[in-house]
Image (cartoon, grey):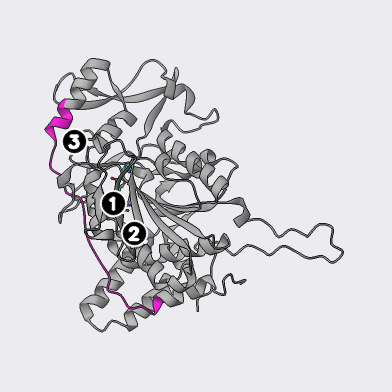
Amino acid sequence: MRTLLGVKTGQLLGRVLRSAAAVRCGVRLSCSSSPSMLRHLTSKIKATGPLPVAEYMREVLTNPVTGYYVRNNMLGPDGDFITSPEISQIFGELIGVWVISEWMGAGGPKQLQLVELGPGKGSLASDVLRVFSQLRSVLGEVSVSVHLVEVSSALSQLQAQKLTESRNREADNKDDPVYRRGETAAGLPVSWYRRLEDVPAGFSIFLAHEFFDALPIHKFQRTKKGWREVMVDIDPEKMDQLRFVVVPSPTLASSTLIESDERRDHVEVCAEGGVIIQQLSRRISEDGGAALIADYGHDGTKTDTFRGFKGHRLHDVLASPGSADLTADVDFSYLRRMAGRGVACLGPITQRLFLRNMGIDTRMQVLLRNSSEPSARKQLISSYDMLTNPDKMGERFHFFSLLHHSRLAKPKKAEGLKLEKKSPAPLPVAGFTELSFS
Ligand SMILES: C[S@@+](CC[C@H](N)C(=O)[O-])C[C@H]1O[C@@H](n2cnc3c(N)ncnc32)[C@H](O)[C@@H]1O
């Protein structure tokens, strides 16, 4: 394997491996029922008619006052679900190695923006930044800044606490696109935005873990008259309950969002996710960088995946809205289509394969060797199993990447030279290629 800045990607992991660390485990998100959300939705439906599922999902999850992600009491010891960065810090550390490896693959630009979409409790960003500190000598003089796109100011406070302790403050002006600013213990600036559009241009590595599945989806049903949109209406028999209806006439969404060769009878389209992918694609092709998207999903094959989670159990998506998480599988074939030709796409590949390619097995061996405490060893083994077991998260979650075209370009022969001198081959893309570790 070629090296850049004198370090192989596998060696990066080797350096992280040597720093012993305890495994964190946590659960998150508890939320009580929200009668005001149901009142809000029913009055909206009475005023304007049934709501597209996308609007229902957007209101329930991100309404600025009563949305699931926005409410203050949503995080707690009795969570609704658990995510990989919360299961083990190994996960975030391997992503940290991936970020540095992509920065190296781009030739080590002088500035690096780490941008995370939907950072939750801030655990992934915190684990990535710890790897940055451990590999400071590799990063050299690069100027690193951290940019978090988070719709929930309550969650932004938790993130700020984790990443900056008390070194952060809210913007004085409510219209400031940077609504919170802070600084990590190592002096890295951290900024919070509600929208990706507000993140400054520049070479960036974007991370999105369980973000796209939380974005609003439209649902469509094939009928004898063609595609029709599924909407949310008030149940006429129980006025305080909601039900799904298939609207009789086409809508703008049903006329524009379905591919002409679609073969399924029921389709979910996350148009908001498509717009975000287009933005990422444009930024990467213009400013350089890469995006790593990890989520559960499919390649344009599944139909009805819209579901709710509450207390680690499935929950009726229309019952007590605002009290449970809502989610839908990510359609990676749609994301790939939306990325267009401006970037190269890799994946989706399973989480199990990605983590194995990133060296999780080697990392585990080192941690187990350094840990004599039986309960800590048990914890390590069970979190490894949760992340990689095909029946758990190993094959349900997938990794997908957007890359600048130069990262996958074939070596070119130098023009006008008598001797055949090839341009150097790009470094392999970590995680998507099996690497050797030393
Ligand atoms: C399912 S949680 C995942 C959290 C974290 N990435 C993890 O894996 O633990 C979704 C995150 O995305 C944020 N979020 C949801 N919709 C958003 C939107 N439209 N814009 C910005 N953030 C959003 C939520 O507040 C939350 O932080």
Q: Vertical placement of 69 versus 53: above or below? A: below
Q: Which kind of residue does numbered mark 2 sit on?
A: Leu
Q: Which kind of residue does numbered mark 3 sit on?
A: Thr
Left or right: where 117 falls relative to 25: right
* Residue at 53% over, 42% down: 282
Q: Are marks 3 and 2 in contact (CB under 8 Å)?
A: no
Return the residue at label 2. 124
Q: Which kind of residue does numbered mark 1 sit on?
A: Gly
Return the residue at label 1. 120
The image shows residue 180 at horizontal and vertical percentages of 28, 47
The picture quadrant where one finds residue 416 is: bottom right
* Residue at 35% over, 41% down: 328
Marks 2/1: CA distance?
9 Å
Q: Are marks 2 and 1 in contact (CB under 8 Å)?
A: yes
Return the residue at label 3. 66
Is residue 32 in the magenta section?
A: yes
